[in-house]
Image (tube, rainbow, N blue to C red):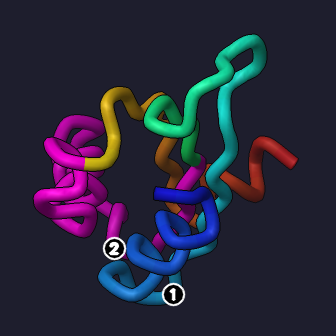
């Protein structure tokens, strides 16, 4: 599964999500990915709950197409503070 397809899948399931997916540095296979997701749906959610929302958006792709996912999730406010 390519990075653009993963971005579109996550964005389609999380309202107003800003999604960036890439291959981690030094990793040369397509089933290891790194994603940064910013969404207002993360407001008031624990980090574990935020990650679960992303995993739910990816559905069975997490077991069939994606072997490993390095995941960073932020609310829009948290993302603005990091800028």
What is the span of residues highlighted in magenta in the rendered image?
A: 36-64
Q: Is residue 45 above or below residue 7?
A: above
Q: Quick one: 78 or 55, which is closer to the camera?
A: 55
Residue under label 2, please give it. Answer: 41
Q: Is residue 81 above or below residue 7?
A: above
Q: Where's residue 41, x and y in %?
A: 34, 73
Asked whether disc 2 touches disc 1, contact meaning CB atoms under 8 Å apart, the reply is yes
Q: Where's residue 44, x and y in %?
A: 27, 58
Count neighbours of disc 1 (C-alpha within 10 A) and say few if under 14, some if 14 to 19, many if 20 or more: few
Q: Which mark is residue 16?
A: 1
- Dot 1 falls on a residue whose secondary structure is loop
Q: Quick one: 28 or 59, which is closer to the camera?
A: 28
Residue reaching furthest top? 26
Residue 47 located left or right of residue 72: left
- Dot 2 falls on a residue whose secondary structure is helix
Q: Is residue 35 magenta?
A: no
Q: Residue at x 57, y 58 (%)?
A: 2
Q: Where's residue 73, x and y in %?
A: 47, 47
Q: Quadrant of residue 57?
A: bottom left
Q: Quick one: 57 or 25, which is closer to the camera?
A: 25
Q: Residue at x 15, y 42 (%)?
A: 63
Q: Residue at x 63, y 52 (%)?
A: 21
Count neighbours of disc 2 (C-alpha within 10 A) and say few if under 14, some if 14 to 19, many if 20 or more: some
- How far apart are the two marked residues, 2 and 1, measured between alpha carbons? 8 Å
Q: Residue at x 51, y 87 (%)?
A: 16
| Principal secondary structure, stretch drawn in magenta | helix
């Amino acid at each position: 599964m390519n990075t653009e397809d993963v971005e579109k899948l996550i964005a389609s399931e999380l309202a107003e999500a800003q999604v960036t997916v890439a291959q981690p540095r030094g990793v040369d296979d397509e089933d290891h990915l790194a994603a940064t997701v910013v969404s207002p749906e993360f407001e008031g959610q624990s980090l574990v709950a935020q990650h679960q929302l992303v995993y739910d958006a990816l559905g069975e792709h997490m077991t069939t197409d994606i072997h490993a996912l390095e995941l960073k999730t932020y609310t829009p406010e948290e993302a603005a503070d990091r800028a």
